[in-house]
Amino acid sequence: MKVLLVASEAPPVVSGVARSVGRLADGLAELGHDVDVVSMADVPHWYVGEWRVSAFVATWPRLLRRIHRADVVNLHGPVPTMSDAFLALWRTVPKGRRPPLVYTHHCTIELDGLKTACRAYTRVHERLAHLADRIVVTTDSYQEILADGGRTPVDVVPWGVDMPADHHRPLLPRPGPLRVLCVGQMRPYKGMDRLVRATAGIPGIEATLVGGGSLEHELRRLAAHLGGGNITFAGRVHDDALPGLYAAHDVVALPSVTKLEAFGITLLEGMSAGCVPVASDLPGVRDVAGPTGILVPPGDIAALRRALLDLASEPRRLHALRDASRRRATTFAWDEVVDGYDAALHTAAGIERTTIDLTRPHATAHLVPTRRRRRPALIGLRPRRLPTESAAAEGEQAIPGRHLSQPRDLHEPPLRRVVAGNGVEEDEVWVRPRDAEDLTDVGRPQPVEGKVGALRLAEQATPGAYPDPRP
């Protein structure tokens, strides 16, 4: 499908939103979608203090041409003067030329000194969000918020994380002080000043702050004033250096003070390396950090300091939480993120994804509608195999197909990609259209080779549309 993805930030911008949008766009492209990305970089905009104001309405006529070319649109928000304007103008698009819309809700706008205005804005924007055909959120907390009083289906698709290559190795207890890492933009809502005040001069705790922003110099002065010789400012670092930093620390902190923080990609990144998340008790953030970490009231310096001191004084508890946090991070796979969006986009576009349920290996079965459910984390490992001659030797009929890496004749008919899986691993094969029709013919059983529990027909693609992703 042709997917138009509209978001406030996208690579090469460095931020959690940009990183997530970039990974989503790349993942959808790997599945064969034609992805077009529009971000604030494509729209005239200005900065008013910490916030951007855009001329999105003025660019709407130009954007309409890209909308008309799309099979489905994925809008990310809320972004004042951008996502709200998009949603308000959406119904002005003639119905016959309006593609399905999937809206991704990231957070709640909340600014100090403007809380009443922000609450009013949130109410309006959430009503506008229900103009979409489908809504996607990252946590159960926001599903409850967005589903309240609305008719639009709300799907939960958490963001993902790349696990380190050595994540199967046992974590070893580390002597010495508790090492605390905080990664993010140094902006008021991130609450890094609370972390500085909570850790400055505290024996047994060392803190490292990574990132830059409008408050960097102020935070450095605050640390010096409080005698924070135990606080290191690492500045901005390349993404490639972050895994090493996470691996060298015991705790990943997210002391944000407003609902602008609604997930915490850095929490997942730290957890994947064995860091215990210590974070503010905010909607969305608590869903990520709560099960294996420590939650503190937003802005409560004393509670944050107490949580860190407790971990420093209980090495066995610290080690147990580190291990549990790393295991929990394995449940957040980027493959699952892309799969969740692929399902939401297909559903919004009216294209049904179907499965063939098998009761045992080498069995035959009938086509049944797919039911969306969270699959185990091991789905992130996707070995790709083809039915082989050994299947025929065992009396089974192999599905005609081939490896993704096999050369294709550009004059042959388009192929269909069939994904086979048992809920733990998936295989991919290519089949000719007539074979795909057999597989999708309700009521016609098809022999399937290999230890598979289901077959899912992915979308049709022309030859060469899916390059071999393997090195």
Image (cartoon, grey):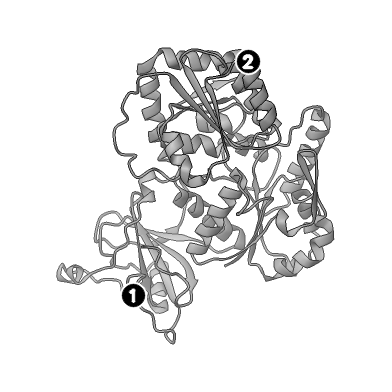
In the drawing, does residue 384 fall left or right of residue 159?
Answer: left
Q: Is residue 424 visible?
A: yes
Q: Position of residue 83 (x, y in %)?
A: 74, 50
Residue projecting furthest to the bottom: 411
Q: Secondary structure at mark 2?
A: loop
**Dividing the image into 4 quarters, which one contains the N terminus?**
bottom right
The image shows residue 283, relative to residue 223, as above or below, that is below
Residue drawn at point x = 63 percent, y = 20 percent: 224
Q: In the depicted view, which residue is nearer to us: 355 or 50? A: 50
The image shows residue 249, relative to residue 341, as above or below, that is above
- The residue wearing badge 1 is 406
**Dividing the image into 4 quarters, which one contains the C terminus?**
bottom left
Q: Amino acid at mark 2?
A: Leu
In the drawing, does residue 54 fall left or right of residue 393?
Answer: right
Tell me the tag on residue 305. Answer: none
> Residue 456 falls in which quadrant of the image?
bottom left
Tell me the tag on residue 226. Answer: 2
